[in-house]
Every structure is written in C-alpha cells, then in structure tokens.
C-alpha cells in the first residue's frame, strides 16, 4: 500500500520504509524469475519436448526422494550435540595433521585447488 501511495519514492527513508522497499524489491525479483522460468519452460516444451520431459521426470524424482526442499535439523538432545562436536573435533584434528608444516606451524587450508600453487613464484 505504501508503495502504491508513493511513500517509498521519497529520497530519505526510515528503517521501516527501507525494509518495506527491500521486501517489495525482492518480491518483484522473485515474480520476474518465476515468469521467466515459466516462459523458458514453455519455449522448451515447444522446441525441445524430449528435454522438457526429461526435466519433468528429474523434478518428480527429486520430489519423491525429498530433495526438492531443504530440511534444517538441530540436535534434539545434549548427547547428540556432544556426539556431533566429537566428530567435528576428530575431523579438525585430522585436517590439522594433514596441513602441518615442517617447522611445526599450522597453515590453514584456503582452497584445496590452490594448495599446490607456490605463491612466491607469482611475484607482485
């Protein structure tokens, strides 16, 4: 309603107006994405029905297996939490041993793909 009345067109916003404007912008982007996706699927169905059929089959498969939505889980008990912490601690110790340097210093890994690059040879 504030957007339609032009209240969100002012140069200076208070915090509530900023949040409203951000929400409206996000909703507009989501709507635009949904319409572009529907248009893409329509074009795909017209020009490449076999690909569209394959995508639909994969979508149905993902829905059946429950892969179409993210489920956030948290430990249900303190024992489960402590077990998870123990597993993470063991993995951390294994990583520390793997990246231990000869001088006894620990070098935290940045990216495994970049671990073999000698940055001193790159220069400035």
Image (tube, rainbow, N blue to C red):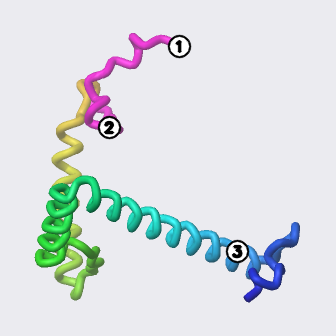
Task: Tell me which residue sits at (87%, 72%) in the image.
Answer: 10
Task: Tell me which residue sits at (18%, 82%) in the image.
Answer: 79
Quarter of the image for residue 17 reads: bottom right
Quarter of the image for residue 1 reads: bottom right
Instruction: Using residue 4 as the reference point, say whether residue 37 is left or right of it.
Output: left
Residue 18: x percent and y percent? 73, 74
Closer to the chain start, of discs 1 and 3, is 3
**Local crowd size for mark 3, using a 10 Å CA cut-off: few (<14), some (14–19), many (≥20):** some
Closer to the chain start, of discs 2 and 3, is 3
Quarter of the image for residue 47 reads: bottom left
Q: Is residue 1 magenta?
A: no
* Range of residues picked out in magenta: 104-124
Q: Secondary structure at mark 3?
A: helix
Residue 98: x percent and y percent? 18, 38
Q: Which mark is residue 124?
A: 1
In this view, which residue lies farthest toward the right? 11
Task: Tell me which residue sits at (20%, 59%) in the image.
Answer: 49
How many numbered marks does the figure carry? 3
Closer to the chain start, of discs 2 and 1, is 2
Residue on which disc 2 sits: 111
Q: Nearer the viewer, mark 1 or mark 3?
A: 3
**Local crowd size for mark 2, using a 10 Å CA cut-off: few (<14), some (14–19), many (≥20):** few
Q: How far, Cα to Cα, is label 2 from label 1?
A: 21 Å
- Which of these two is toward me, 91 or 20? 20
Q: Is residue 116 magenta?
A: yes
- Which of these two is toward me, 42 or 32? 42
Relative to 110, residue 87 above or below: below
Do the residues bearing badges 2 and 1 touch, measured as CB atoms within 8 Å? no
Residue on which disc 3 sits: 21
Q: How far, Cα to Cα, is label 1 from label 3?
A: 44 Å
């Amino acid at each position: 309603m504030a957007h339609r009345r032009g209240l969100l067109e002012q140069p200076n916003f208070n915090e509530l107006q900023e949040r409203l404007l951000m929400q409206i912008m996000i909703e507009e982007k989501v709507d635009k994405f949904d319409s572009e996706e529907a248009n893409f699927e329509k074009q795909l169905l017209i020009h490449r029905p076999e690909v569209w059929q394959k995508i639909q089959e994969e979508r149905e498969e993902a829905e059946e297996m429950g892969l179409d939505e993210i489920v956030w889980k948290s430990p249900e008990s303190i024992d489960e939490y402590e077990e998870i912490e123990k597993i993470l601690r063991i993995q951390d110790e294994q990583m520390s041993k793997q990246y231990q340097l000869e001088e006894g210093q620990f070098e935290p890994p940045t990216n495994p793909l970049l671990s073999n690059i000698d940055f001193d040879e790159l220069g400035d």
